[in-house]
Image: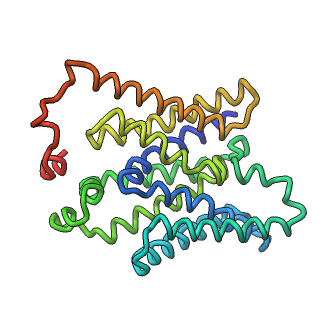
Amino acid sequence: MQRALIGGLLTGSLGGLLGSFAVLRQLSFFSDALGHSALLGITLGLLLGINPTLVLVPFAVIFALLVNQLVQRSHLPADALLNIVYSTSLAFAVVALSLLETYRGGIQQLLFGDILGIGWLDLAVIAVLLLGALVYLALSLRAQVLLTLNDDLAGAFGVRANWHRLAFIILLAVVVAVSIKAVGVLLISAFVVIPACAGRLLSRRFPVYMLISGTLGGGCALLGLLVSGLTNLPSGPCVVIVQFAGFMLALLVSQIRCWSPSTAVPAGARTPGAAQAARE
């Protein structure tokens, strides 16, 4: 349980941190597609007799690179392409899993995660990944904010848009792959999307938004695990339910702010210019 609490804190914080960028860049469906497609990577590891965790990370990186190239070259809507890719890979994975008689009993752990099965090595990997993500985002924060606002604006400021976009996608893919064991294939997207959406409701300043998203991700994971332990219910779904409760609370707070006369904004001052947004 101690390892689970630490793992939930690290995984939730990491998902909330990267989710703050993924949501604004409309990459939330990418994390969902990658999570579903990861089942195929796990199945390949089982068929080859290799630890699925060792296969999952390179599989996720290759998947992210291929999807990025497919989106750029096909000129089709990204959400449609992602739907095709993850549906097809999920179908192959389910067919392959049906051939593995000895692993049918573990399908629930793959789908919903088993955070109580996290070991110290898994915690070390997640901690290093969180530290690496923090360093990368801190060093490239200006470029990340500009890319989130507008690609052309980022290019005008001398940002290497393609490189930073690809680096972020690979980082997100690795985070999703590492978190699959704890969260599961079906729930991984919630760890990325829900805390970020709640943080967006509570703050419009980018650094504060990132901090709130990461804090909500880690805090909701801890609270969800405690609820799971007290009620003897599945840990992954409990965490997602707590995250949803946090989102609803954030929505209520944002609505109260809008109704408060002291926070009312004159009509002519509601829309900041692009330059002001870039400076923030």
- Residue 177 drawn at (x, y percent): 59, 59
Describe residue 204's horizontal placement relative to residue 156 as left or right: right
Q: In which image quadrant can residue 239 be found?
A: top right
Q: In which quarter of the image is the C terminus?
A: top left
Which colour style is shown? rainbow
Compared to residue 119, the image places residue 231 above or below, namely above
From this viewpoint, which residue is outermost toward the left?
Answer: 268
What residue lies at 65% left-to-right and 27% top-to-bottom?
226
Q: Which residue is drawn at 28% across and 26% down?
A: 258
Residue at screen point 55% across, 50% down: 189
Whether 207 is drawn above or below 125: the answer is above
- Left or right: where 131 falls relative to 233: left
Question: Which of the two residues, 232 or 268, is positioned nearer the viewer here?
Answer: 268
Q: How many labels does the image show?
A: 0
- What is the residue that sits farthest to the right in this orientation? 101
Q: Position of residue 245 (x, y in %)?
A: 53, 29
Quarter of the view holding residue 209: top left
| Residue at image location 44% in from the left, 49% down from the top | 19
Query: Given the current orientation, which residue lies at the most extreme front position?
Result: 267
Give the quarter of the figure containing the N terminus: top right
Q: Which residue, as the protein is rendered here, is positioned at the far top?
A: 261
67 w.r.t. 113: above or below = below
| x, y percent for residue 133 | 42, 53
Q: Where is residue 59 shown, x and y percent of the image?
A: 60, 70
